[in-house]
Image (spheres, rainbow, N blue to C red):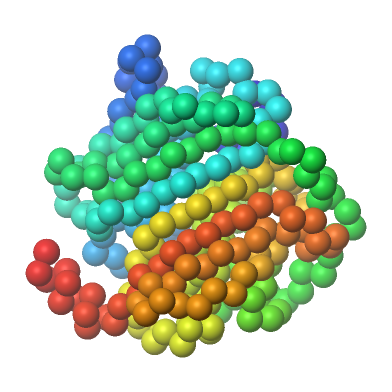
Amino acid sequence: MTSAADSALRAADTATDDLAASAPGAGGARLPLHVDETDRCFFDHPLDHIPGMLLVTALLDLVRAEVRQHAAAGLDRLRMSLSFERICELDEPVLLHCDPAPAEDGPAWRLRAEQEGHTVCRAVVGLGRTAARPDGRGPAGGVRGGPADAALVHRRFPENVLLGAPQRTEEAAVLVPPAGHRLHGGPNGLHSPDALIESARQMATLLGHTAHDREQDSQMLWTTLEADVPTDVPTSVPLVLRWEFTPARGARAPYPMVLVHAGDGARLGRVEITVHTMSRTRYRRRRAAE
């Protein structure tokens, strides 16, 4: 794999070590999910469940470890289709599964997280090649202003706010995680897929409040993700997310977003997240009944 793509698809050391002992010759990998509730990135604030972004990153870590076994030169896109099927509890072990899947232009894997015999989430992740994409490396554009209001993206620690303050309702800058952050792209200075997905998740959360008038204390449950993002774009390239307006459908709302170069407007990727919103009271009743 090219050094750029390998950096963007970096593997956590623990994932790599465990996978080395998981019999890759069997055609897949199995790995227990490591949950550290002191991790300021994933447990930014008190939670009664394992956060979706921890599951997404853990599944991508499985892929990153598997990629090392493939000749992946020239693969500069990551495509992920994921659905959450149930809330992942904090007090039960989670097993991650990764198996090869059919693909057209690069390696692909079927992944799932399992808890107590139930599938929590499932995904297909593939690597591919960009077809005639604008290079997106024109003059830096005007990414203006500071970060988004942390309360509107449901973050507490400033380093975890990965979205700029919206210049318009439908557009906000992608912010780069600081060095050492769990979602940072590594020493080669690339936008990591994890960080791009988290920026989009924060955009969906913000739009729930600003565009769909959700109450400030609403519980927003992330239900699906469709992502097609580059793995080779330097963090020096300023990026923005632009929401393609779609009305809410009751409690559920899809948030399709285009990832573009802030300077020349080149379209570099796309992310769509679906969110199910419920009142805090209703959420507590649901959890008490489970």
The spot of residue 161 in percent (x, y) is: 55, 67
**Left or right of 215 in this view: 129:** right
Pick the quarter of the image with the C terminus.
bottom left
For residue 4, above or below residue 285: above
User: How many marks do you count on the picture?
Assistant: 0
For residue 147, above or below residue 59: below
Residue at figure coordinates x 57%, y 29% from the top left: 104
Residue at figure coordinates x 42%, y 84% from the top left: 214
Q: Nearer the viewer, residue 162 or 227?
A: 227
**Residue that extends furthest to the right in the rendered view of this protein:** 139
For residue 3, above or below residue 176: above
Quadrant for residue 42, please give it: bottom left
**Left or right of 227 in this view: 215:** left
Residue at figure coordinates x 64%, y 39% from the top left: 77
The spot of residue 281 in percent (x, y) is: 22, 83
**Left or right of 224 in this view: 183:** right
Quadrant for residue 238, please give it: bottom right
**Residue that extends furthest to the top in the rendered view of this protein:** 25
For residue 237, above or below residue 279: above
The spot of residue 33 in percent (x, y) is: 30, 40
Whether residue 62 can be seen here: yes
Whether residue 202 can be seen here: no
The spot of residue 206 in percent (x, y) is: 52, 76
Pick the quarter of the image with the N terminus.
top right
Quadrant for residue 46, please give it: bottom left
Residue at figure coordinates x 30%, y 78% from the top left: 278
